[in-house]
Amino acid sequence: MLFRQIEYFQAIIETGNFYQAAEKCNVSQSAISQQIKKLEQELGVKLLDRHNRTFSLTPAGE
């Protein structure tokens, strides 16, 4: 699943938000969010700082 999670992460960065990334990847927004959280847990680093409806990349995410 790691490849798919990285694909989702890339889509989030390219589109600038979770909703559009979900549409691009043909999955639900909640699925994208869950997979990014799982990716962060597997890597042991936080990739995104979430702010209400926006996000910013952490140094690890960059």
Image (spheres, rainbow, N blue to C red):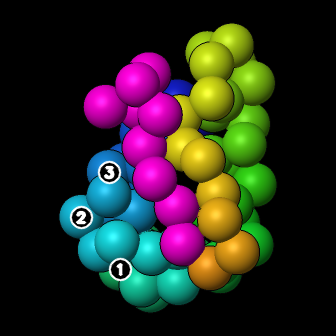
Q: Which residue is mark 1?
A: 24
Residue type indicated by callout 1:
Lys
Residue type indicated by callout 2:
Glu
The image position of residue 41, as x and y in percent, is 75, 24
Which residue: 54% across, 72% down? 54
Q: Where are the magenta residues, as a range?
A: 54-62
Image quarter hosting the C terminus: top left
Dot in front, 2 or 1: 2
Q: Which residue is mark 2?
A: 14
Which residue: 55% across, 44% down? 48
Q: Is residue 49 left or right of residue 38?
A: left
Q: From what the image shows, is residue 34 above or below residue 14?
A: above
Which disc number belongs to residue 10?
A: 3
Residue type indicated by callout 3:
Gln
User: Label 1, label 3: how many angstroms apart (C-alpha)?
Assistant: 11 Å
Q: Residues within 10 Å of mark 2 (few under 14, many from 20)?
A: few
Which residue: 64% across, 57% down? 50
Which residue: 70% across, 75% down? 52
CB under 8 Å between discs 2 and 1 = yes
Q: Secondary structure at mark 1?
A: helix
Q: Secondary structure at mark 2?
A: helix
The image position of residue 10, as x and y in percent, is 32, 51
Q: Secondary structure at mark 3?
A: helix
